[in-house]
Structures are given as structure tokens and as C-alpha cells.
Image (cartoon, grey):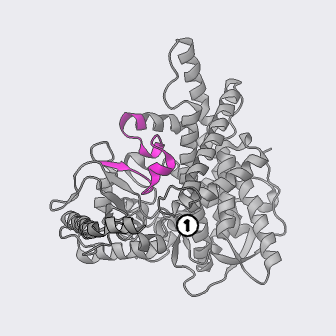
Amino acid sequence: MNSLLAFLSPLLPFLASLVFLVIFLEQISYLKKKRSVPGPPLVLPFVGNAIPLVRNPARFWEIQASLAKSSGHGFSVNYIAGNFIVFIRDTELSHKIFANVHSDAMNLVGHPFGKKLFGEDNLIYMLGQKHKDLRRRIAPNFTTKALSTYTALQQIIILKHLKIWDQKSSESSPKPIPLRFLARDLNLETSQMVFVGPYLGEEIRENFRTDYNLFNVGLMKLPIDLPGTGFRNARLAVDRLVEVLADCAKQSKAKMKREEEPSCLIDFWMQDTVKELEEAAAAGLPEPVHTSNFELGLYLFDFLFAAQDASTSSLLWAVSLLDSHPDVVAKVRDEVQSIWSPESDSLISSEQLAEMKYTQAVAREVVRYRAPATVVPHVAAANFPLTESYIIPKGAIVFPSAYESCQQGFVEPEQFDPERFSEERQEDRIFKRNFLAFGAGSHQCVGQRYALNHLVLFIAMFCTLLDFKRHRSDGCDEIAFNPTICPKDDCMVSICRRCPRFPNLSLQ
């Protein structure tokens, strides 16, 4: 030991100088990329501002937005775990990013460390013709007929969980119950039933739920891929989830070969896929791209990821905002009562859903007011001219802010006002470019009609079947990231049934 220390002692000044040189060069590189754009003047070596981002994401992005707004640039910069980042608040600059997703400009990544979690062949990362071909294949999943099939499944699951919420609240009374994990469970079961329902057994569903929770936790961790870490657990959970979903695709192919009626999303998808596979086999050709069970498992996981956490966020904010706007609740109840009665024991039809104009406006305003996925990460594949005076350097992570765009343009955007989406005001058309909650460009959310239908059905049934009271405390509605945004207190409420009895809904 003494001999080792004797050997290293003369080297310590050189090692210290080397470390200092690396830190110095890192700062110079950051400042060179930063130029005159607002952002921290100096950053911590190696980690940058990763720690503040992980500790309090809401505060971190709030500061970035404030810098972007106050400077007049419309964007700001920072440095996170060795990555130079650009935060974009300006709506038109965000559209410029969304419109330039291709191999030599911007690459969508979905999450700063997404490729390590989702894999390289994920739908999120596809570009060009390959991406267009897959979007074409996905189109049958969201036809009017398919959406009608989903709304029936959605209502049955929503009703099941509202009954659970009512029971839990009764057992907890007078203490309120937190809705975040309950809403997550509602959405996870809905996603399972709508996407692959008939192909998941009860035990698999429970394992699925556990693995998805591990994945959720890992999304909020630093990408330290070592045994026992949250990130490693998440990556392994994704592998298991994809394997389960790939098996569901295999079972659906067999069902569609028998020409049975589709009963979930993967069935609608496999109807044409099975025909293509049979035609290719008859012609002695290889299987078409995007049709292997493993690929389909990956794409189904994309759908799950896109639908699950965003919908959970919207359900929680809907409850919180409805509680603070009793006039909105009254209007929703009046509208729903004029169209659908729980005592009828019938499902809300697609036609009835389309008649609920005000409830639809409420759902759209919830999504605008609290856009679930606040930022949409991209990576600059090449130097990218953002403005006449600033070029985003190659390799930078770029964050167009859907949340900030939704808080601009609209009349009094800081107010929760469903009437802005009425036929009289038509702010959804006037300020269409500001409504970026579902993204824009070639990667705009393909399932937004499904997502809005889910939120409309939830609001209609929640307001009609239940009375509810939000338990408000200091800071309860501050934004927390889990990983999409939700109320800081997990939305504490007291609930009780308001109708004479819950409806008896079935698919028959």
C-alpha cells in the first residue's frame, strides 16, 4: 500500500491538472454552444443541472420557460449529464422542430434516455418512408367502427373502477383518498382491454401491472444501468412487457385467420396484416416489414406508453378542475342527463357521445390547460438553424414545450374555460397552432381521438354517477412529474354515489 502511494504521489499534480483541463474544456464547449442565449453562465462538471432536474422537474422547466420568455428569444439552454439542451417556449419555433423530423435534422426521442429503455427499433424513432408505412398500417386501428368498439370497453372499465373508488372512499371516510394510483390502475386496465384484451390472463395482467410500474419508476431515474438500479429494473421490465405483447399479436393473428369479428385494437390491426402475410407466403416472398410478432410487441408497447401516463394525468386534472368549477360540473350533468340515463343500463353510443358537445369542450380544455406531456424531446442530428441568429449544435437535446404553447395565444389562457371550444368562440380553430398537446407534424399522436373519447366518457360518467369533493391543502395543485404531470398531492378526494344505483353495463 505504501509503495502504491509512493508511486502515485508524483502523479497527483498531473492527474489534478488533467481533471481541471477536462472541466475547463467542458465549460468552454458549453459557452460556445450557448452563445448569447439565456441559460446558466456556468454548469457543474459532468452532471450539469441533472440533479435539480431530477429533484424538482416542475421547477426546472419553470425556470427554463421564464428565461425563454423574459429574454425575448423564445428559447433557453442548459446542460444535463453531458448533454447540451435547448428548451423552446415559442410556438412557431416548436412547429419548426416538429416539421423537421428526419434523418439530417431532428430525431424524436420521446424521453432523454429513451433509446436505452425502448430500444432502437421503436416506433418513436422511425423516420421517412418506414415511418409512413407503419402509420398507414396503424390507420385501421382508429376508424369509426374501431373507436366504437373501444368506447364500449372503456365504459365498462371506467364503471368498474368508479365503483372501486366509491367503495374505497366509503371505507376511508371521513379521510379523503388519493386518486393517482387508482386512476393509473383504471387506465392500465383500459389499455390492456382495448389494445389486447382477450389475450391476457389474470396472472399475466397482474405481472403486467407490476412491470409497468417498474417502467414508470425508471423513467424518473438517471440512466445508471447497473443491477438493482431503478433504470435497470425498468429496462428489464420493458423486455418482459414487449414479450407479453408479442404473444398477444401472435394470438390475434390466429383469430383473424379464422375471420372472426375483431374485439380489440390488435385485432383491427391484424385483419389486413394477416392478408398481407398470406399473400406474401403464397408468392414465396419474405414477411412484409412491421409484421413480426416482436415488432408488433414493440409498437403495442409504444401505444401503451403513449396512452397510459398521459390519460392518467388528464383524469386527475379533470377531477381537480371540475371540483374547483362547480358551474362546469352542473353543465356537464345537465348535458349528459339529456342524452343518457344510468337507469337505462345501456352503454353510451357513439352517436350519443358525439352529441355531448359541452363535455367534449371540457375534455379539450383539460388537455389544453394541463398538457400531460409537457415537453417532447428531440435530438439534433445535424447543426440546425433555429433562427437567423442561432444554430442548434449537432447532438443537442431539444425540448419543444407543448405545455407552454397551450398557455399562449388563447384568450386568457391562464383561465380554465371550456367555452373557448364552443361553436361561438371557436378558439380551437383560431389558435389551432398553439394547441400542441398532441404534438404536430409527422409524429403527431395517431390516437388523439381515442384519448379524447376516453376523457369525455370519464368526465360524463364521473360527474353523473358520483358526488365528489377535493381535499384542498397548500400547494395541492402544484405540478408534479410522475412522469407526466399530476397534482402534487396525488389528487385527494372524497367520493360517494349520487345516482340511485350504478348502471349494469355489458357488451351484449
**Which image quarter: residue 359?**
bottom right
What's drawn in magenta, residue-wise?
106-132
Q: Is residue 336 visible?
A: no
Image quadrant where one finds the C terminus: top right
Please tell me how crowded label 1 is: few (under 14), some (14-19), or many (20+) other residues with Cα within 10 Å.
some
Q: Is residue 37 visible?
A: yes
Which residue is at 51% across, 19% downward? 286
In what element is the residue under mark 1? loop
Does residue 295 show up magenta in the picture? no
Q: Residue at x 56, y 60 (%)?
A: 229
Relative to 443, is 410 above or below? Answer: below
Q: Position of residue 388 (x, y in %)?
A: 15, 59
Tell me the quarter of the picture where residue 455 sits.
Answer: bottom right
Q: Is residue 288 left or right of residue 76?
A: right
Q: Which residue, given by chain and number where applicable, does mark 1 sit on?
A: 482
Residue 269 is left or right of residue 410, and the answer is right
Is residue 122 within the magenta segment?
yes
| 301 or 317: nearer the viewer | 301
Q: Residue at the spot x=26%, y=74% of the render?
A: 42
Q: Is residue 323 above or below residue 254?
A: below
